[in-house]
Each structure stands twice: as structure tokens, then as C-alpha cells.
Amino acid sequence: MSISRRAFLKTGAAAAGALAAGLVMPKSGVAEGKKVVVYAARSLDGDTLRRMYALVCGNLTGKVAIKLHTGEPGGPNILPRDWVRDLQATIPDSSIVECNVLYPSPRQTTEGHRAVLKQNGWTFCPVDIMDAEGDAVLPVTGGRHLKELAVGAHLLSYDSMLVLTHFKGHTLGGFGGSLKNISIGCASGKTGKQQLHQVTADGAWPGGAPFMERMVEGGKAIVEHFQGRMAYINVLRNMSVSCDCEGISAEPVRLPDLGMLASTDIQAVDRASVDMIYALPKDVRAPLVERMESREGLRQLSYMKEMGLGSDEYELVWI
């Protein structure tokens, strides 16, 4: 099952007028009080990131995990380290968190991963490689593919999570937003990521709708684990069709920077990000739209709705 191009272009056309006017973008047929708020800012700098965090951090308590993609060696498009440094300094008892990876990379091992962290400048605060000491298992309620997901064992040490995401394309997922950041990003490097990807004996990495659905199911396990103590910020900057997992091999950036989006709702923040892409002129959005649609990436959104993971009804509130 997938979302049609026509449906998203219709949404994008409505979004375009709202974006141009700098206004709230309502969704029809839903009472105003029931819409999820997605905060939006056009500015891209560390001060704006801190302002966005302040708007959505109300439920974050205790020990806070900051989940972001720290990138392959020398990756050109990862989030600016000074932005993250200055934000992390304002969040008591917080650490950046990652997990090792499944694909060939120095980041397959904890030792190699730590070397890449140092190379990429993530040296200003603790970085917890959550599967360095093994896995923990979270249940997946209502999944058609997964009944459980293996995550880094250290995930259980945190009370809350800030999902700080560089929104961009993705080779298998079509796009990488907050869902991908927590589902793939918190899954343990071997067991959990294999549960999600289902890499075959001959080395193929199957994608398409079933992969999107497994990714949603994994994300649901993590969201339910934190019981509302999560916040999401998507940074729409340096958007290539490639993920930061491709490092220096990533395709060139072809889309304009659009700003930041923040919410306490995972589906709404990813849906708003996709809507902003579709609101661009056809020739401008074409590379990322082609990547999303050719990989059935919009299934991430429709399956989140089916699984009750967040809301598809939102309003943009510009700051």
C-alpha cells in the first residue's frame, strides 16, 4: 500500500501558499483543537535550534538521550557540531546516543565507531554507543512483521529522548526523517538492524513497502517505551537524495534549505517535512520526490497512520 503522487501534490499545492504567506497550514475536516502543532522556522543556526527545542521539551525529564546521525567519516552534510554542542550544553544529564551499523563501515565496531566520532568532531560531550555492551528487546505491539526489536541495551538507561534529525533522502527508505532516526538508529548493529532490513544470504538489501512497515514497527516500539517523553526536531538543510550513512560518497545537495520543524509528534513532524518538499516547484523538488516515490518511501507515513503512531493532522506554527 502506498500514498499516491497526486495526493501528495495536492497537499503540497496547499502547503505552498501557506509557506509563501508564512501562515499556519490547517488540514480540513479536523477540529482546530485536535490538530498537532508543528513549529516551523526558516532560520538555520544554533540559536534557532535552541529556540525550537525550548518549544517542545516540556515532557523531557531525567536522563536525556539525544539521538542524531553522527555520520560516516568526513560526511559533508551532517548537522553542524557547534549547533549541537551549544544545544547539548543546555540539556542537563544529556548524552548523544548512537548504535553500531550493519553495512560495511568503520562504524560496524564500537572501536571503529569511536574513531569516526572523534574524526567528525563529536568530542564535546559523552557519546553513548548504546549497543557497545549488547542488546535489549522491546516489544512491538500490533506489528504485522515484527513482534520485538533488539535495541542497544543502554537505551534502557534513559528517561527521555530528543530526536534531532537531519532530514534528507535515503537509498532504501526514500527519505530519512525522525522515524528512520529512531528506528534504524536505535536498533542494535547486528540483530536489530537485521530485523529491520532483512538482508538476504546473497547480500541483497530488500526495500519497498515491507521495509517501510518494519521501520514503522520498530519506531513504534521505541515511542511506546518512552511513553510520551520524546521530542522531535527535523532540520531541512543540505538535503541530498543520499543519507549521511553514505559519507563522502553522498550525491550532491540539489534542494534548497527550508528551515527547521519541531513537534512532540513523530508522524506530524515527518509528514510536515515531506509536505514542505512537495510544496516546492516541481523542477526543484524533483530529485528528492523521485527518490521518495521510487522507493515507496511515503509508505512510512501511511503505515504510521495505520499503526496509530502519531497524527496526520497538524498545523504549522511559524516562529
Image: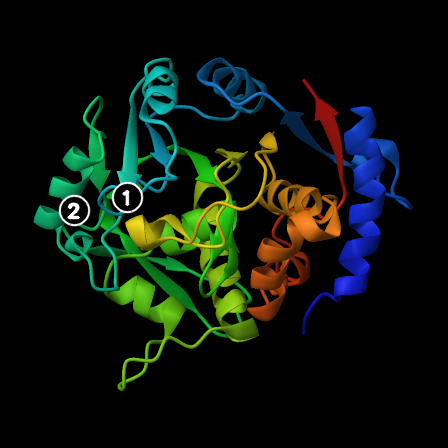
**Quadrant of the rendering where the N terminus is positioned:** bottom right
Residue bearing mark 2: 113
Query: Is 157 above or below relative to 110?
Result: above
Q: How many marks?
A: 2
Q: Which residue lies furthest to the bottom in this view?
A: 202
Residue 148 in view here: yes
Left or right, 153 with respect to 138, comes to left
Q: Where is residue 229 in the image (x, y as percent from the top left)?
A: 48, 33
**Quarter of the view holding residue 90:** top left
Within 10 angstroms of label 1, few (less than 14), some, or many (20 or more) residues? many
Left or right, 85 with respect to 59, comes to left
**Quarter of the view holding residue 3:** bottom right
Residue at 45%, 59% (x, y): give it: 218
Query: Which residue is more in the foreground, 159 or 151?
Result: 151
Residue bearing mark 1: 98
Query: Is 51 above or below relative to 294?
Result: above
Secondary structure type for disc 1:
strand
Could you tell me if the residues under marks 2 and 1 are in contact, i.e. CB atoms within 8 Å? yes
Q: Position of residue 65 (x, y in %)?
A: 34, 33
**Quadrant of the rendering where the C terminus is positioned:** top right
Residue flagged by tag 2: what amino acid is it? His
Q: Where is residue 78 in the image (x, y as percent from the top left)?
A: 37, 38
